[in-house]
């Protein structure tokens, strides 16, 4: 169910992608992707490894600028504006929180991890930073576990805690879009469920793009889901329909039923 | 239950043999160092005294101490560091954090490797032509230190670059994705976590610089000066050249003196290396990931 561009006001969509293609050193990694992500919903992306899911996320926040050999063609609009026309890519990236597959606790204290974004933007007052740190750690369901040791190293937390720390750090950017790239790959099931609860709450405040290797996770969280396969977008469908046999493409049905991938 | 086969037995024997071979080779490596130190301590040790360290040479350098050479070496090293560390660290930062993989970058990398391979006597002649004559610094500490700086730049660059690259790319990516610029990422994450390696490189440079003789011979080190340098445009004596001079150029030097000078020089270098090792051990103890 691909919605034509321009059918809505630009502001209805957090992300609009038109005929996106991504190459690494000339080799095509993803092509012919056209889709829209409505504001304030969880948009799932599923697909086997090497299908271009991560590259898709990198194109949204212009990480092609930081990646040697990565070329993006086509059009990506965030909040109605072509990402190439953003005043500067750093401002764009500040609006977009990113969570990686393997948790990246920066080698700073827990406090400094969460305060980093605010500090990069020039917030210096300790009181302001305290508020941001506590709020973000609470929303990432980590506060109770770390509130007594905010000065210890974030990179030495357990995997599940570090992943919640990275979510807290992403939230500290006060983002309008949150990109999650297979966040549960190195996280235990209990933590995964806690993070999923957090995401369900965050949906009312921001747009979430959830790339996941667990099709059931997409089913639990996403309103609509895109299926990527070997560098192409197969379809975008209402998640429930996709899992109830209503997929447009037989490959999607096969994938969500676990027949390959 | 599990019976070791003849092949297992043979593998085990070969394993032991290779272990011994490598151990033996490693011991061979230590031998010259130990011998040099032993000879210097036995034959140069008696020469060392406060008077030796802190007085002027006398009687055509056949008596007295080595103060001007000691002070001169410190001058040379400090000025060389001031010149080379900022340039070297900046170049390493550029190459590691900014440089795209293009022809210019490859040319620069090639230049660094070649710079490291240039014989020191060639650096000496370059320094003579460039700093002494062309820039009109004359034979001076400045000219000699700049020559040493050029020569040791690759040490700083390579050590710094390697140290920067021990910081995982994932940390940088996390910062960039938050909207940090490359410089903000360097300042907040990369530099604080690679400073130990950079300092190690600097210390290695110090020990290398203090021992070099050829590059300073034509550019600023003097055969004999009865006074201490007052500024960077003065000539100076230096430990390495002083050792060369009293070993080969001056008649009737008592035998213990060259050994004494060599002992002081090598002690300076070893002390520097010791500091660098201690520093690395200290920082390894507070590893952050």
Image: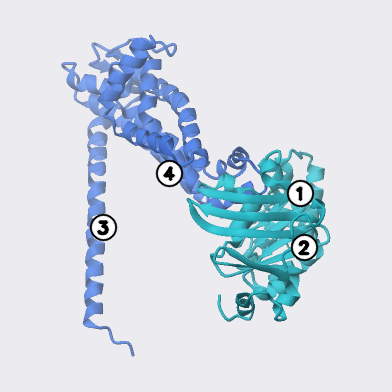
Chain colours: A cyan, B blue
Q: Position of residue B196 (x, y in %)?
A: 50, 42
Judging by the rendered image, the residue that carries numbered circle 3 is B23
Q: Nearer the viewer, mark 2 or mark 1?
A: 1
Q: Are dots 4 and 3 in contact, CB under 8 Å?
A: no
Q: Are dots 2 and 4 in contact, CB under 8 Å?
A: no
Q: Position of residue A236 (x, y in %)?
A: 69, 67
Describe residue A172's horizontal placement relative to residue B193 as left or right. Answer: right
Does residue A156 show up? Answer: no
Judging by the rendered image, the residue that carries numbered circle 1 is A80
Question: Mark 1: which secondary structure?
Answer: loop
Crowding at mark 3 (Cα within 10 Å: few <14, some 14-19, many 20+): few
Describe residue B21's horizontal placement relative to residue B200 as left or right. Answer: left
Question: Mark 3: which secondary structure?
Answer: helix
Judging by the rendered image, the residue that carries numbered circle 4 is B277
Same chain shared by disc 1 and disc 3: no
Give the chain letter at badge 4: B
Between the residue at mark 2 and the residue at mark 1, the CA separation in whole angstroms equals 38 Å
Describe residue A253's horizontal placement relative to residue B8 as left or right. Answer: right
Location of residue A68 with respect to A4 vertically, above or below: above
Question: Mark 2: which secondary structure?
Answer: helix
Does residue B28 show up? Answer: yes
Location of residue B157 with respect to B29 vertically, above or below: above
Location of residue A3 with respect to B114 vertically, above or below: below
Q: Nearer the viewer, residue A237 or B145?
A: A237
Judging by the rendered image, the residue that carries numbered circle 2 is A144
Q: Position of residue A110 (x, y in %)?
A: 69, 53
Q: Nearer the viewer, mark 4 or mark 1?
A: 1
Between the residue at mark 4 and the residue at mark 1, the CA separation in whole angstroms equals 56 Å
Q: Nearer the viewer, residue A72 or B109?
A: A72
Between the residue at mark 2 and the residue at mark 3, the CA separation in whole angstroms equals 53 Å
Give the chain letter at badge 3: B
């Amino acid at each position: 169910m691909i919605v034509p561009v321009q059918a809505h006001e630009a502001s209805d969509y957090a992300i609009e992608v038109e005929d996106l293609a991504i190459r690494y050193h000339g080799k095509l990694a993803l092509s012919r992707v056209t889709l829209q992500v409505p504001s304030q919903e969880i948009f799932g992306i599923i697909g086997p490894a090497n299908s271009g899911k991560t590259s898709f996320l990198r194109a949204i926040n212009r990480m092609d600028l930081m990646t040697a050999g990565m070329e993006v063609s086509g059009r990506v609009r965030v909040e109605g504006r072509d990402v190439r026309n953003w005043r500067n890519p750093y401002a764009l990236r500040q609006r977009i929180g990113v969570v990686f597959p393997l948790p990246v606790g920066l080698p700073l204290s827990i406090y400094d991890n969460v305060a980093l974004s605010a500090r990069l933007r020039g917030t210096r007052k300790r009181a302001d930073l305290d508020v941001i740190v506590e709020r973000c750690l609470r929303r990432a369901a980590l506060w109770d576990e770390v509130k007594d040791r905010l000065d210890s190293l974030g990179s030495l937390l357990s995997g599940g805690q570090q992943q919640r720390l990275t979510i807290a750090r992403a939230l500290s950017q006060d983002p309008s879009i949150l990109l999650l790239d297979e966040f549960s790959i190195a996280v235990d099931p209990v933590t995964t469920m806690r993070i999923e609860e957090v995401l369900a709450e965050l949906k009312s405040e921001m747009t979430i793009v959830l790339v996941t290797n667990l099709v059931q996770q997409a089913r639990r969280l996403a309103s609509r889901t895109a299926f990527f396969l070997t560098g192409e977008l197969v379809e975008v469908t209402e998640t429930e329909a996709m899992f109830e046999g209503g997929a447009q493409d037989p490959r999607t049905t096969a994938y969500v039923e676990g027949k390959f991938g | 239950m599990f019976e070791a086969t003849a092949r297992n037995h043979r593998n085990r024997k070969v394993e032991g043999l290779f272990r011994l071979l490598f151990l033996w080779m490693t011991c061979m490596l230590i031998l010259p160092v130990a011998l040099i130190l032993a000879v210097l301590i036995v034959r140069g040790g008696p020469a060392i005294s406060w008077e030796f360290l802190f007085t002027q040479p006398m009687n055509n350098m056949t008596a007295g101490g080595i103060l001007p050479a000691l002070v001169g070496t410190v001058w040379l090293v400090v000025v060389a560091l001031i010149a080379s560390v900022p340039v070297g660290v900046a170049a390493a930062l550029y190459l590691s954090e900014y440089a795209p993989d293009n022809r210019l970058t490859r040319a620069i990398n090639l230049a660094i490797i070649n710079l490291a391979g240039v014989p020191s006597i060639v650096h000496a002649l370059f320094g003579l032509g460039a700093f002494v004559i062309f820039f009109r610094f004359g034979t001076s500490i400045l000219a000699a230190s700049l020559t040493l700086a050029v020569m040791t730049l690759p040490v700083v660059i390579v050590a710094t670059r390697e140290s920067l690259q021990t910081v995982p790319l994932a940390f940088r990516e996390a910062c960039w994705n938050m909207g940090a610029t490359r410089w903000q990422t360097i300042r907040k994450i990369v530099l604080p976590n690679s400073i130990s390696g950079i300092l190690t490189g600097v210390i290695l440079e110090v020990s290398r610089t203090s021992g070099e003789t050829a590059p300073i011979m034509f550019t600023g080190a003097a055969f004999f000066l009865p006074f201490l340098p007052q500024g960077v445009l003065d000539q100076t004596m230096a430990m390495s050249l002083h050792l060369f001079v009293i070993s080969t150029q001056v008649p009737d030097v008592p035998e213990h003196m060259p050994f004494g000078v060599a002992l002081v020089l090598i002690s300076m270098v070893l002390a520097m290396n010791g500091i660098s090792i201690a520093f690395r051990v200290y920082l390894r103890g507070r590893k952050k990931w």
